[in-house]
Amino acid sequence: MTYGSYTPSSPFPSLTPAIKLLLVVNVVVFALNAILVGRLSDNGAWFAFSWSGCLEGYGLGLLRLLTYQFTHSFHSPGHLLWNMLTLYFFGTLVEGAIGFRGVLKLYVVGGLVGALLHLVVALAMDYQDVPLVGASGACYAFLVHAACQWPRMQVIVILFPVPLGVLAGGLVAFGVYEQYVEIVTGAAGAVANSAHLGGALLGFLAWKRGWFRDYASFVGGEGFFASLRKKLARARAHREHEREAATQREMDRILEKIQRHGMPSLTKQERRVLERASARAQRK
């Protein structure tokens, strides 16, 4: 499946608006987390996702389904760096295909699906209150989406070119194996493989079904509201045309009645119709 005429043409793609915004937000949240840690919390977990965290604050805890996606532990700058590189290389490719708003939707929904799959596995293994942070679920959504669209595109991995489809498939397969080992052994690892796999699944489905494409980002395209306004305008024009046609039919009937029986034969309603038609004709 391809969108428009976009094809990746550079090993170092230009930074696109939505990815630039996501990079800035992630870095700013990381910096705030590093500054505030020890002041408001001992580990910055107020942004993290967990089962008990979602139940806090009379429902406001559910916001952590969103905030966790922009949060990385200040103890693990490598986690932030890896995710931001993934966003840069693969998110910019995807933005060229689905547009600004499409990228933001894919990021948020990819992270949401990742969190929900993680929660299912965590509940089954009884570690549902371990905080989850990071953009990895969303990043896997971008990785898989890009790999499905350009599976033969060569990417450099430790100095060797590898097809993007092979890279994404290998990482997903490794995540499946790691998750299987965790379930069999009953020991949760330090990496939330289930969140990665949830994001990967969403990325595949988004590519397969053409979800999240932002038509307003493409020449000749239009967004949802612009399309809605056009449909409403066409509906109004159609109704107006129907009203005018009905009025004209009524006028033809009245004029024919006058011709046959004279003005005295008209009812009060027919006279009002005739007067309104005469007034409209004078305004024109």
Image (cartoon, helix red, strand yellow):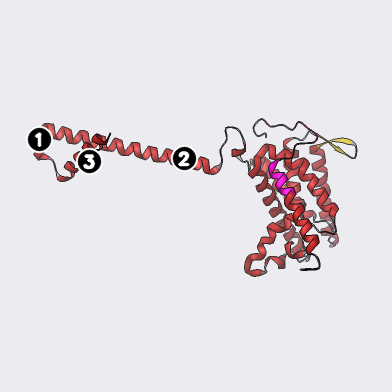
Instruction: Say whether disc 1 or disc 3 marks the residue closer to the N-terminus.
Output: 1
Tag 1: amino acid? Gly
Q: Quadrant of residue 20?
A: top right
Location of residue 196 in the rendering, given as x and y in whole percent from the top left corner? 77, 51
103 or 150: nearer the eye?
103
**Residue type of the residue flagged with mark 3:** Arg
Q: Looking at the image, which is closer to me, 229 or 51?
A: 229
Mark pair 1, 3: CA separation: 19 Å
Whether residue 76 appears in this view of the structure is yes
Q: Secondary structure at mark 2?
A: helix
* Residue occupied by mark 2: 231
Magenta residue span: 5-23
Residue 12 appears at what percent x and percent y? 80, 36
User: What secondary structure is the stretch in magenta mostly built from?
Assistant: loop
Dot 1 corresponds to which residue?
Answer: 262
Question: Of tags 1 and 3, which is closer to the observer?
Answer: 3
